[in-house]
Image (tube, rainbow, N blue to C red):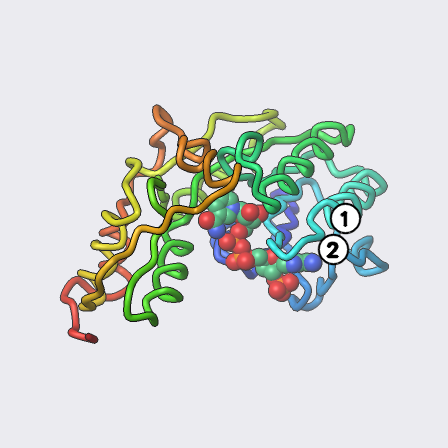
Amino acid sequence: MTTILVTGGTGTLGRLVAERLRTDGHEVRVLSRHAQPYAVDLIRGGGGLGAAVAGVDTIVHCASTPRGGDEKAAAHLIAAARRAGVGHLVYISIVGVDVVPLGYYKAKYAVERQIEESGLGWTILRTTQFHDLLVQMFEAVGRLPVLPLPAGVSDQPIEVAEVADRLAELALGAPAGRVEDMGGPRARTFPDLARAWLRATGRRRPMLEVPVPGKAYRALRSGGHLTPGNEGGKGTFEDHLAARYGSGSSARG
Ligand SMILES: NC(=O)c1ccc[n+]([C@@H]2O[C@H](COP(=O)([O-])OP(=O)(O)OC[C@H]3O[C@@H](n4cnc5c(N)ncnc54)[C@H](OP(=O)(O)O)[C@@H]3O)[C@@H](O)[C@H]2O)c1
């Protein structure tokens, strides 16, 4: 039995990773700002972090926020892991963090560097966007009478359960460094993905493709966040939508 700490183990991905590892019979601790008894704000660090990492073999680091502070959080986690003699730190990153200059991606790329230089055994997996994220985006813009979509951008979304399976597998193995990227079954345009979401939710909306200026969107239009040839995920967006909304659609207007 291995003792594993899952940071962000209450989030979309971390919850599933923790579940998988517990089902496999491992002792799993979950850390987040609100997860008792390991309620720790990694950006602030502090005493509770030492107790959370004491006696831990492996950390799966899923805690993150696009609002800023991931580098600080990683620095606190790495320092605590080194003090506790943790053998393996597994990190989930995003395909394209090195080529798409979005603020959040730059922070995640910096965290990758921190982990590589930490002196700890490490494994980094980069994946594409989870289906859940696309649903959140469509539900947010779906309140508008017209669906605004980023012009010329595709996405290759993946089912989070499959990412959780892979992360759990990596957590139970030896430190592997940067492993092969993992993407969903295929890259699709935003209007194509939006049509699938509209069908599944029984909505009708005109779509408006909006050209977005700037370097980050240029990199997205060039597919810097896609991973052709690494279609490790099998679940499609339609599978995800059917599981979430049911296979029949209800007219919502
Ligand atoms: N979503 C995607 O499409 C996608 C794609 C590829 C990679 N990833 C990566 O996968 C990871 C998990 O993503 P997710 O979508 O599952 O995120 P999520 O649902 O937003 O969960 C984030 C988790 O981090 C915790 N957290 C946030 N700030 C914290 C802090 N300062 N200290 C301690 N815990 C903190 C949250 O719990 P509390 O609120 O209780 O603190 C929560 O458990 C992230 O690293 C993300 O970059 C995501």
- Residue at image location 39% in from the left, 43% down from the top: 162
Residue 123 seen in the current view? yes
Q: In terms of image quarters, where does ligand 1 lie?
A: bottom right
Residue that label 2 marks = 42
Instruction: Indicate the position of residue 62 as horizontal and vertical percent values.
Output: 59, 49
Q: Residues within 10 Å of mark 1 (few under 14, many from 20)?
A: some
Q: Where is residue 9, by image quadrant?
A: bottom right
Q: Nearer the viewer, residue 148 or 1?
A: 148
Mark linked to residue 100: none
N-terminal of the two: label 1 or label 2? 2
- Residue at image location 58% in from the left, 41% down from the top: 105
Instruction: Indicate the position of residue 221 as horizontal and vertical percent values.
Output: 40, 36
Residue that label 1 marks = 72
Instruction: Indicate the position of residue 82 as horizontal and vertical percent values.
Output: 81, 38
Tell whether 56 sits left or right of 221: right
Q: Nearer the viewer, residue 65 or 215?
A: 215
Instruction: Indicate the position of residue 89 as horizontal and vertical percent values.
Output: 67, 37
Q: Where is residue 42, by image quadrant?
A: bottom right
Q: Secondary structure at mark 1?
A: helix
Residue type marked 2: Leu
Residue 25 seen in the current view? no
Q: Secondary structure at mark 2?
A: loop
Q: Quadrant of the C terminus?
A: bottom left
Q: Where is residue 178, by image quadrant?
A: top right
